[in-house]
Amino acid sequence: MRGDEPWVREVFDGGLTARVFRIHAAGRDWTLKKARARAGVHNVDGQTSFLNEIQRRADLMRLKSEPGGVQRFAGIVDTQYASLRRGILLSPWIEGAVAQTWDERSLGQLFEQLVELYLAGLFEWDLCPGNILDDGRQLMLFDFGYMYRFDPLTQFNSAGDGTSEPMFHPVERFETRNFCAWLLEMEQKQGASAALAAFRREKAVALPLYERLRAALAERAARPAMLARFDALATRWRAALRGDAAALYLAENWRAHVLDLSDDLHGQSCTPMTLRRADWLLATLREHFDALVALAALFGPDRGRSQAELLADYQVRRRQAECFQSMHAGGGGASLPA
Ligand SMILES: Nc1ncnc2c1ncn2[C@@H]1O[C@H](COP(=O)(O)OP(=O)(O)OP(=O)(O)O)[C@@H](O)[C@H]1O
Ligand SMILES: [Mg+2]
């Protein structure tokens, strides 16, 4: 495969670990993912992501072959063939495009799928827009380079020893990597109340699915701490949905933009969106610092610091984000806390 063969219909060359070809064969379209000789991501997770994806593909095909598996994993692409040695992965071509809008149907399908994966002991870290395709009827996941195994009965996720990072959970991953950037765009184009309404809709879809997840974990005798985490999340979301959810909006968006900003700075992969995130954080610090403290929304090293200290710190980060843009125009990269 060079990419100029007559059966090649499209080439996606932007990925850091692989080249992706849309090919036509045996009367239908396929996606051939071909590993790059050397991954463009300079951390262990990136360098091993093709191997990891092949292992996850095997897990997923096993799950799909269980009774009811096809329905339970309807949002997971099939794997026709995969070989680490040959560096290729073949899947059916998925019709559709990167999800542009999030409604009850697409959010419901995504969260249902993430809950199934979670219960099966698979944690997906990279729910960025480019990793979710939607044809208007069925949402599909197909990139599992940063999906890892964990034990949902004793661990929160696959980070650290499984109990060290309770902050990360499926809905959080979607908000941080994807939805909160979409909300930011909405805030700026359609105003704060439209964004708040979309946020409420998202939580209203997520809440019953997390209640179901919690019940399934309880049924399987998960450790109390696992149940307590989902109880705490559900209690918080339920209270927010009884009111206007503005406080929760502030806290969740703060977390999402802080995490993604630091990811972009780490990977030196800043874009104009990174600057908009930094501006949102600075404006929120100026206008809502007391609310952030009251909500216990400040986390990590930010907790306990003064407004002036935080403003100075985030101004430095904004300037770093400006530098990385001019140095790496057009560059992309993912460094995930897995
Ligand atoms: N089965 C598929 N059907 C349709 N399009 C696909 C399929 N698989 C991949 N693509 C397209 O190819 C792009 C890259 O695929 P994928 O995300 O698997 O590769 P990647 O190298 O891991 O990319 P990145 O590093 O950017 O996440 C996707 O964003 C999507 O547009
Ligand atoms: Mg991808």
Image (cartoon, helix red, strand yellow):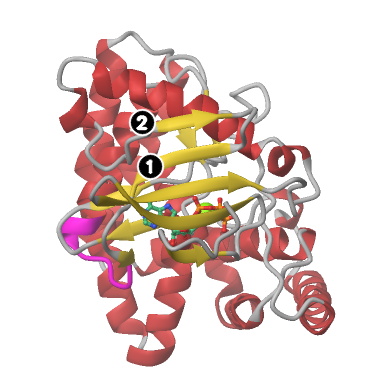
Q: Amino acid at mark 2?
A: Leu
| Residue 31 seen by the camera | yes
Task: Give the left or right position of residue 28, taking residue 261 as reference.
Answer: left
Q: Percent from the top left, x then y, of residue 96?
A: 27, 64
Front position in the image: 196 or 85: 85
Q: Amino acid at mark 1?
A: Ser
Under 8 Å from ligand 2: the CB of mark 2?
Answer: no
In the image, the segment drawn in magenta is: 99-106
Q: Quadrant of residue 278?
A: bottom right
Location of mark 2 (residue)? 117
> Does residue 262 sit above or below 62 in this rendering?
below
In the image, residue 102 lies in the stretch drawn in magenta? yes
Under 8 Å from ligand 1: the CB of mark 1?
Answer: yes
Front position in the image: 253 or 324: 324
Task: Give me the disc on residue 91.
Answer: 1
Q: Which residue appears at 60% of the width and 76% of the height? A: 277
Q: Which residue appears at 47% of the width and 47% of the height? A: 32
Task: Give the left or right position of residue 256, taking residue 120 as reference.
Answer: right
Q: Percent from the top left, x then y, of residue 146?
A: 57, 40
